Image: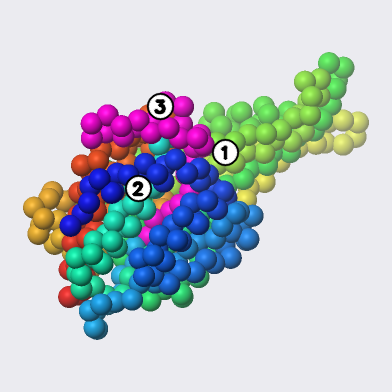
Amino acid sequence: MIDRTRLVAEFLELVRIDSLSKREGRIAKRLGETLTGLGAAVEEDDAGQKVGGEAGNLLAKLPGTAPGAPALLLCAHMDTVVPGENVKPVVSGDVIRTDGTTVLGGDDKSGLVAILETLRVLREDRIPHGPIDVLFTICEEYGLLGAKHFDAGRLRARTGLVLDVDGACELVVRAPAANKMVFTVHGLEAHAGVCPEQGISAIKVAGEAIAAMRLGRIDAETTANLGLIEGGLAVNIVPNRVRLRGEARSLSLEKLEAQTDHMRRCFEEAAARHRTRVGERLHTARAETRVERDYDRLDLPVDAPIVRLTERAAANLGKPFTTRATGGGSDANVLNGRGLQVANLACGMREIHTVNEWIDVKDMVATTELLLETVRLHTGA
């Protein structure tokens, strides 16, 4: 039986452990010891070395107790976003929130505790189950780097659940693919007071490109953003170079490529309009674009076995259940891109990535109950 008091106590303990991306060493040690105590064989990979972090991904393999039952993957991430140091959780009835100076870290420590409590109950109540692979990743909040550097061939399971999305009793089966982009605008430097007409302002070119660009919510399936800009040398020098970093996401691959091309064209067309002659030489601004697929989309059919299984578990418990899409990426995107069939189960977090983040204990309990029943049903799949 799920121990509500234990669940809450562990959540409060974990959120007090600082675990920013690339600095997951303390929480990885704590989780590794806990998983070992639950009878799992725990391994830490070299992802931390590859990304310059304190710890790698943790893979814990729990033996099955039901002969012939299929393996199941349970996954959550260990890192949190800034501001996430010295978290002081405030408990008010069933609601846990921050003191307003940091995030809470329910993203994704609510997922971590739901998995750990499920493993405890399986053991304490001697519930038969198949082999369970538990994957706790690093650097999910830093571009899904932990999952990207994880060797999925080490898993026994080919299906499972990631617990890493807001809401409760919901299953995300669709999530966007994303392209990350770097735009570099090359202008021409000149003295801003003596001969500005001999220069081409890269900042001005970039400004025109941005003004012509569709950004934010493009349609129901597509978003785009420019998030970082850097450039210029001094206030008295016409800037000769500006670099911008951005992204586009879409549930539709065709729309993703169309938005990416649109953003590229805005820079190229703006650059082509700017030229100046210095002596005998004609100078023209130019724009370079580098595009990289950040992660593939998650696109599970609603009749996929893991979806049907979770839906059946909710029905057994008399809980409401919905499937939906999201605009965010998660480790589920990466794992599905590696050939697994993984959905993303909501685990109670609310207003994530803000200092207003909170979670309701009732949602944490409901998530754990749903996860436990899903594992139980999977044994007979």
| Amino acid, disc 3 | Asp
Using the image as rendered, state which of residue 34 and residue 351 is in the foreground.
Answer: 34
Q: How is the image coloured?
A: rainbow
Determine the residue positioned at 49% across, 56% down: 28
Q: Secondary structure at mark 2?
A: helix
Q: CA separation, marks 1 and 2? A: 50 Å
Q: Residue beneath label 2, please?
A: 10
Q: Which residue is mark 3?
A: 99
Residue at the limit of the structure toward the top, as seen here: 193
Q: Of 251 and 152, which appears nearest the observer?
A: 152
Q: Position of residue 87 (x, y in %)?
A: 45, 35
Specify the label residue 239 is tagged with: none
Within the magenta stretch, is there residue 115? no
Name which residue lies at 42% across and 26% down: 100
Residue 317 vs residue 332: left or right? left
Tag in front: 1 or 2: 2
Crowd band around label 3 with a 10 angstrom C-alpha radius: few (<14), some (14–19), many (20+): some
Say whether residue 16 is visible. Answer: yes
Q: x and y percent of residue 30 in the render?
A: 46, 55
